[in-house]
């Protein structure tokens, strides 16, 4: 039964990580490997040695200057031949019941990717305004229903190893603070994956305000970075005509903001981001 390879990047969240690792004791009979990639200072290794865990784990020291996707890729170098890969953020709490339901939903062997739900207020039906087609796919009006989903959370999903290999196996390290979930889902879709979101399985995401990639985002121009990554996503998965169209739409929107608020930032960020991505191979 121990056919799951678990990947957990961590950064300055020892308490959260420790609690998650204790939660995994309820899943220990299914675990083949747990690889923790640590970007913390000091490293978490000594503190983790004091925790009573029912499974073997490995701590790999990551580069604090690199993205979370770089950490995930470091962990993937230790993959052997497990049937499933389980990607986890370090600030999750998972109940014994949730693990039980994960196994039950995977047992029929008809889906390639399973995305558990998150305890959140938006599980209730409510009015949602959509700003884009991607936004609509990510935010249906009723989160409480299971469904096909294009966006796949890199920090909470279970994927069949063969499908993951067909999608390229490694994560794209170009993505820093945004876009990796969309890219991951698109690659899986292109590989023919059946991607299933199941809110019957509920996981708690603590969304801790410190540590993780939030530390990295403090050093970036967030709006410019997100615009770069949006154009990169479009360039990677769509035609040149679509990229150009998205650029023009963004410019028009930027000029509307300029006229309304006398703010040049949207126009400037759009032009800078587009030029940057056009130069990328």
Image: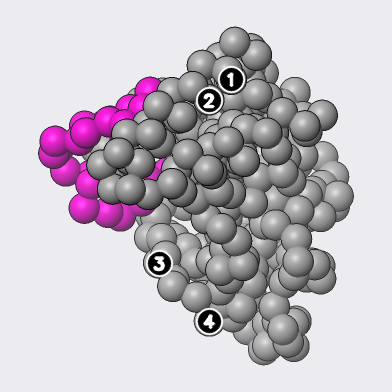
Q: Which label lies toward us, 1 or 4?
A: 1
> Mark 4, residues whose alpha carbon is within 10 Å: few (<14), some, or many (≥20)?
some
Mark 3 / mark 1, whichever is N-terminal: 3
Is there any visible trace of residue 246 in the rendered image?
A: yes
**Marks 3 & 4, CB-CB < 8 Å contact:** no
> Mark 1, residues whose alpha carbon is within 10 Å: few (<14), some, or many (≥20)?
many
Q: Is residue 150 left or right of residue 47?
A: left
Where disc 3 sits, the SS reads loop
> Mark 2, residues whose alpha carbon is within 10 Å: few (<14), some, or many (≥20)?
some
Where is residue 238? Give x, y as percent. 61, 16
Q: Which residues are magenta?
A: 116-141
Residue under pointer 3: 206
Residue shown at 20% from the left, 35% from the top:
128
Mark 3 / mark 4, whichever is N-terminal: 4
- Say which of 150 and 95 sits in front: 150
Residue shown at 45% from the left, 30% from the top:
250
Q: CA distance from mark 1 to mark 4?
A: 43 Å
């Amino acid at each position: 039964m121990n056919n799951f390879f678990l990947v957990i990047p961590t950064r300055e969240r020892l308490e959260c990580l420790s609690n998650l690792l204790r939660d995994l004791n309820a899943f220990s009979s299914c675990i083949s490997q747990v690889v923790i990639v640590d970007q913390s200072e000091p490293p978490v290794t000594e503190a983790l040695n004091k925790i009573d865990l029912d499974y073997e784990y490995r701590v790999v020291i990551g580069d604090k200057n690199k993205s979370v996707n770089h950490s995930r890729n470091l962990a993937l170098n230790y993959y052997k031949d497990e049937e499933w890969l389980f990607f986890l953020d370090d600030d999750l709490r998972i109940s014994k019941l949730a693990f039980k339901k994960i196994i039950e939903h995977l047992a029929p062997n008809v889906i390639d990717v399973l995305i558990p739900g998150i305890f959140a207020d938006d599980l209730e039906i409510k009015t949602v305004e959509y700003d884009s087609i991607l936004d609509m796919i990510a935010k249906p009006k009723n989160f409480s229903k299971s469904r096909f989903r294009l966006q796949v959370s890199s920090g909470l999903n279970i994927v069949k190893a063969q499908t993951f290999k067909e999608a390229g196996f490694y994560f794209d390290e170009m993505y820093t603070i945004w876009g990796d979930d969309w890219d991951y889902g698109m690659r899986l879709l292109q590989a023919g994956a059946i991607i299933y979101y199941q809110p019957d399985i509920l996981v708690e995401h603590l969304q801790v305000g410190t540590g993780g990639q939030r530390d990295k985002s403090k050093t970036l121009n967030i709006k410019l970075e997100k615009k770069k990554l949006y154009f990169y996503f479009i360039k990677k998965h769509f035609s040149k005509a679509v990229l150009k169209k998205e650029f023009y739409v963004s410019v028009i929107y930027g000029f509307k903001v300029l006229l309304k608020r006398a703010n040049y930032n949207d126009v400037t960020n759009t032009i800078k981001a587009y030029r940057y991505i056009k130069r990328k191979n």
